[in-house]
């Protein structure tokens, strides 16, 4: 069986289309939670990095520190994270999940899994393995900044 040639731009377009489908499905699934996609991403980053300094969170979110502060304010207001003094530098603040935040992370992760399942359902195990392998190679080549 001949495999049709796919140009780099064709492949890039397909990746972007799937990424848009994933974002849309993720937003639809998150509609059942109190967070929008940007807030959910921040919450997941806090969970993965905690305790995380505000400046590091802003960098990982690729936003200005003030924008990260705005997102964290929403998360603090919901009772999902708390800000405390950085034990290494009392002038800085770190963010940690609360027990309510841990529960919400599980809810957000389940929503993301449902969205991914919906969008990626047409791919069989071999296709998934092949796509994952190729995308890992591309992200590894891009360096550590691509992992945020």
Image (tube, rainbow, N blue to C red):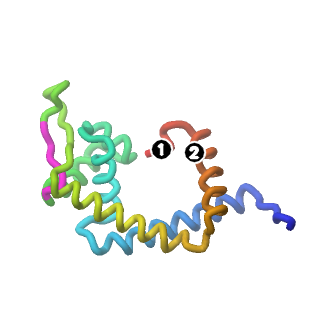
Give whichever of discs 2 and 1 has the lower sequence position: 2
User: Eyeballing the image, is 145 above or below 14?
Assistant: above
Magenta portion: prevailing SS class: strand
Q: Residue at x 63, y 50 (%)?
A: 133
The spot of residue 87 in percent (x, y) is 16, 28
Task: Report the residue that reaches farthest toward the top.
Answer: 88
Q: Residues within 10 Å of mark 1 (few under 14, many from 20)?
A: few
Say if the magenta span includes residue 80: yes
The question of residue 96 being in magenta is answered with no
Magenta segment boundaries in residue numbering: 79-84
Toward the right, the furthest residue is: 2
Find disc 2 in the rendering and name its residue.
139
Query: Which SS class for mark 2?
Result: helix
- Left or right side of 102 for 37: right
In this rendering, position of residue 54 left or right of residue 83 = right
Residue hosting label 1? 147
User: Where is residue 122 drawn, in percent x and y?
Assistant: 60, 73
Task: Left or right? Give the position of 139 relative to 61.
Answer: right
Query: Residue at horizontal 61%, vertical 61%?
Result: 128
Q: CA distance from mark 2 to mark 1?
A: 7 Å
Q: Which mark is residue 56?
A: none
Outermost residue to the front:
125
Quick check: marks 2 and 1 in contact, CB under 8 Å?
A: yes
């Amino acid at each position: 069986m001949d495999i049709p040639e796919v140009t780099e731009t064709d492949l890039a377009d397909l990746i972007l289309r799937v990424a848009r489908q994933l974002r849309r499905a993720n937003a639809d699934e998150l509609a059942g939670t109190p967070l929008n996609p940007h807030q959910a991403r921040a919450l997941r980053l806090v969970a993965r990095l905690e305790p995380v300094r505000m400046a590091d969170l802003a960098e990982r979110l690729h936003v200005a520190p003030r924008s990260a502060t705005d997102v964290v304010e929403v998360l603090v207001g919901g009772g999902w994270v708390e800000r405390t003094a950085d034990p290494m530098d009392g002038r800085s603040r770190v963010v940690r999940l609360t027990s309510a935040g841990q529960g919400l992370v599980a809810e957000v992760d389940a929503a993301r899994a449902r969205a991914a399942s919906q969008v990626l359902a047409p791919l069989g195990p071999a296709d998934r393995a092949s796509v994952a392998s190729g995308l890992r190679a591309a992200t590894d080549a891009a360096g550590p900044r691509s992992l945020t």
